[in-house]
Image: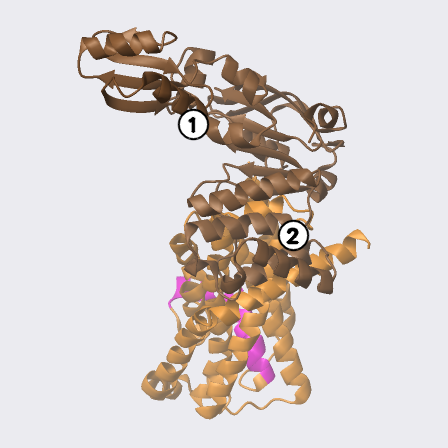
């Protein structure tokens, strides 16, 4: 996949100065977005930053108070039906019919999207297989685990073959296996040229999946770029080594001169940008002679991003 | 496809969805049939002797059961409003409505589906009730045309109450509240109508209300068709149904729009 050529193609979402206020609370305070077709775009931010509101506006669920936007070339305000025809939305809360079976849920979507009967059945069967729900197809979602319900939810979104998919916090309630399935699926979709706008609270997830990330804070986009660009702006990942005494710390600091010492805590912090490979390297250079009392690995998380970008910790914000 | 055929197709799909719900949860239907059946048996076997004796000439010589059944039929249709409001509220408070709203489907198809499902459930309930009534001695003096007209009135009444119940379901914040909001429709209005005793036998204030509320002409038009009442209340009943349907529809439409903030 070549990111630059993909970005050079058409625009999937273009939004200018979106505003939304609920009562006295400004939820969106001038959000601009430009997402290229075939791109995975992550909106990263804590609860209450305005992620879900942005998705609701762009998916025609609620109107913006001010601002304009086009989705796949259709004006959000004037061509709502055309927008709805090309999007698929998986919201934060389960949007399945609890009184229909998994299969019936998928077929209902197909019927509402006017997919011919034979094609409908084939597509539903394929999605049930793909999402590991074939055995649960004849049961109602009431009997499903959280992960299964979420997978059905996403499968329903895919019945219509949307060109742009909104995934609002996709791993909410997902077990690791379902999360893996979902991530794999997102990658497959992108290979087919589908554009994805996902929201998340986890930098790690945005990093894994997204071509570009926009950081949302208090209804404004405070930073935007590729995961690499963003991570360069925040304090790096490091390995933290704790020692029993000052002599061991001295020895370790000589072996790993790039580390920073904390004399009081008897801790040496060594930058670790290369994951496991560089961890192995650090341990090799340390050798067997130095006794390490404790080792921990620190990767930058949303808190670091927020602290770096806004000077505020990423604690819960009120809407 | 024209917009209209698409809308009709989506509405049909949604009605099908409601029927599947009912088949999967027969309690939605059985619950609404039980109460009227109990009332029927109670009034036929326990209270009927005394009430029937007191009615005298009002029933035109027919036994009390013949006077009662049209009222219980009306009550059966009304009893379904709880189910309708509950299913609407379940949709609106769950995530599924947001999915429907972001899909290219006809606006309001989901509400039309609830109305269609509600009317069909009412028809099934009324049929069952009529069967039970015949078993306990209901002997209507009705021609084929009368039967057809009676079905028409039941349908019109069911349609009107369906829209009202959809509006009540849209207005409710919880499923329990949805059922509660239909209790006046399910019990208060049937009892304050001429379903069990003629309006003329009631205290003055109640009598006025009973004589001028929709459930009375609906009951009396059914009575006229089954031979326990003179006169023709059908037009008044249908006018009331049309008015209730329109009011319910406008109210529901406003509620549905309000839900999209």
Count residues near mark 1 (Cα–Cα under 10 Å), then give few for <14, some for 14-19, many for 20+: few
**Local SS, label 2:** loop
Chain letter of the residue carrying label 2:
A
Q: What stretch is highlighted in magenta?
A: B203-225
Q: State the image coordinates of residue A268 (x, y, percent, origin top left).
A: 30, 12
**Local SS, label 1:** helix
Residue wearing tag 2: A159
The reply to the same-chain question for discs 1 and 2 is: yes
Q: Taking A163 as reference, is B5 above or below it? A: below
Sequence-first tag of 1 and 2: 2
Separation of marks 1 and 2 at Cα, in angstroms: 40 Å
What secondary structure do most residues of the magenta stretch adopt? helix
The circle drawn on residue A276 is 1
Q: State the image coordinates of residue B60 (x, y, percent, origin top left).
A: 51, 88
Question: Can residue B247 be seen by looking at this rendering?
Answer: yes
Position of residue A3 in the picture relative to residue A181 (left or right): right
Q: Taking B102 as reference, is A128 above or below it? A: below
User: Which quarter of the picture shows residue A118?
Assistant: bottom right
Locate the N terminus of chain A by quadrant: top right
Q: Which chain corresponds to the colour orange?
A: B
Taking depth in this image into account, of B205 and A110 the one nearest to the observer is A110
Residue at 41% x, 10% y is A311
Residue at 46% x, 77% y is B72
Q: Colour of chain A?
A: brown
């Amino acid at each position: 996949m070549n990111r630059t050529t993909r970005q050079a193609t058409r625009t999937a979402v273009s939004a200018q100065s979106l505003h939304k206020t609920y009562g006295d609370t400004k939820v969106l305070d001038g959000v601009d977005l430009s997402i290229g077709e075939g791109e995975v775009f992550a909106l990263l931010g804590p609860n209450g930053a305005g992620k879900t509101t942005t998705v609701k506006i762009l998916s025609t669920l609620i109107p913006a108070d001010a601002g304009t936007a086009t989705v796949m070339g259709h004006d959000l305000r004037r061509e709502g039906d055309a927008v709805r025809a090309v999007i698929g939305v998986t919201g934060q809360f389960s949007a399945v019919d609890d009184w229909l079976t998994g299969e019936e849920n998928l077929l209902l979507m197909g019927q509402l999207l006017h997919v011919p009967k034979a094609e409908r059945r084939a597509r539903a069967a394929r999605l049930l297989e793909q999402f590991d729900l074939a055995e649960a197809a004849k049961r109602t979602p009431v009997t499903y685990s959280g992960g299964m319900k979420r997978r059905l939810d996403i499968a329903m979104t895919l019945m219509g073959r949307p060109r742009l998919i909104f995934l609002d916090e996709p791993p909410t309630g997902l077990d690791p296996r379902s999360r893996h399935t979902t991530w794999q699926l997102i990658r497959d979709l992108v290979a087919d040229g589908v554009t994805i706008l996902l929201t998340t609270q986890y930098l790690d997830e945005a990093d894994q999946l997204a071509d570009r990330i926009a950081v949302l804070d208090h209804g404004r986009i405070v930073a935007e770029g590729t995961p690499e660009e963003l991570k360069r702006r925040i304090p790096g990942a490091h390995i933290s080594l704790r020692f029993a005494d000052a002599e061991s710390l001295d020895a370790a600091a000589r072996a790993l001169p790039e580390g920073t010492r904390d004399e009081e805590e008897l801790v040496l912090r060594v930058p670790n940008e290369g994951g496991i490979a560089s961890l192995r390297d650090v341990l090799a250079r340390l050798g067997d002679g130095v006794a390490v009392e404790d080792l921990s690995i620190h990767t930058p998380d949303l808190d670091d991003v927020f602290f770096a970008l806004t000077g505020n910790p990423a604690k819960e914000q009120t809407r | 496809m024209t917009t209209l055929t698409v809308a009709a197709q989506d509405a049909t799909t949604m009605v099908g969805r409601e029927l599947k719900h009912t088949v999967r949860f027969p309690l939605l239907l059985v619950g609404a049939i039980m109460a009227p059946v109990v009332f029927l048996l109670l009034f036929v076997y326990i209270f009927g002797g005394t009430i029937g004796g007191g009615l005298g000439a009002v029933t035109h010589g027919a036994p009390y059961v013949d006077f009662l059944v049209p009222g219980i039929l009306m009550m059966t249709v009304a009893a379904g409003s709880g189910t309708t409001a509950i299913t609407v509220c379940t949709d609106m408070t769950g995530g599924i409505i947001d999915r429907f709203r972001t899909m290219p489907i006809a606006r309001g198809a989901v509400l039309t589906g609830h109305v269609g499902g509600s009317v069909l459930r009412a028809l099934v309930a009324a049929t069952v009730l009529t069967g039970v009534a015949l078993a306990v001695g209901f002997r209507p003096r009705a021609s084929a045309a009368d039967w057809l007209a009676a079905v028409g009135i039941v349908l019109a009444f069911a349609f009107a109450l369906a829209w009202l119940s959809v509006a009540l379901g849209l207005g409710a914040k919880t499923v329990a509240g949805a059922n509660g909001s239909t209790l006046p429709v399910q019990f208060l209005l049937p009892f304050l109508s001429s379903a069990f005793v003629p309006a003329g036998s009631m205290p003055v204030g109640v009598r006025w209300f009973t004589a001028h509320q929709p459930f009375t002409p609906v009951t009396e038009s059914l009575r006229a068709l089954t031979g326990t009442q003179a006169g023709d209340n059908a037009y008044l009943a249908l006018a009331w149904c049309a008015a209730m349907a329109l009011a319910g529809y406008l109210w529901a439409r406003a509620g549905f729009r309000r839900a999209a903030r």
